[in-house]
Image (cartoon, grey):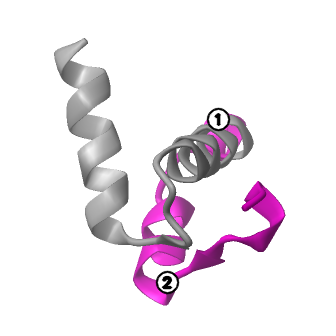
Amino acid sequence: MSQSELVWDDEALKLLEKVPFFVRKSAKKKIEQTAVEGGKKRVTVELMEQIRRERSAG
């Protein structure tokens, strides 16, 4: 699966819109990369929150 094949839930897209515009593109790329590496087909709010927690802990 590639990043272009991922499906974004509406709620996840709304959350992405809250990311400051100047980092939104790189945040989206990182989220999609993490999803693909994890074998995910869909980006959800839960996935986004998991990624945020992992980055905060790291």
Q: Is disc 1 in contact with disc 2, using a CB cutoff of under 8 Å?
A: no
What numbered label is drawn on residue 42? Answer: none
Q: Earlier in the sequence, mark 1 or mark 2?
A: 2
Q: Residues within 10 Å of mark 2 (few under 14, many from 20)?
A: few
Q: Residue 35, image x and y in percent?
A: 52, 52
Point out the residue furthest to the right here.
4
Query: In front: mark 1 or mark 2?
Result: 2
The residue singled out by tag 2 in the image is 9
What numbered label is drawn on residue 23? Answer: 1
Cα–Cα gap, marks 1 and 2: 20 Å
Q: Residue at x 56, y 72 (%)?
A: 41
Left or right: 41 as drawn, with respect to 38:
right
Q: Which residues are magenta?
A: 1-24
Q: Residue at x 41, y 82 (%)?
A: 11
- Asked if 58 appears above or below 25 in the picture, the reply is above
Q: Residues within 10 Å of mark 1 (few under 14, many from 20)?
A: few
Element type where label 2 sits in the image:
loop
Name the amino acid, label 1.
Val
Q: Residue at x 34, y 58 (%)?
A: 47
Q: Nearer the viewer, residue 20 or 12?
A: 12
Asked if the magenta segment contains residue 16, the reply would be yes
Element type where label 1 sits in the image:
helix
Q: Residue at x 45, y 73 (%)?
A: 12
- The quarter holding residue 53 reads top left
- The quarter holding residue 25 reads top right
Left or right: 25 as drawn, with respect to 35:
right
Q: Residue 51, image x and y in percent?
A: 34, 41
Name the amino acid, label 2.
Asp
Which quarter of the rendered picture does the N terminus lie within?
A: bottom right
Numbered marks: total: 2
Q: Residue 55, image x and y in percent?
A: 31, 24
- Asked if 48 appears above or below 46 in the picture, the reply is above
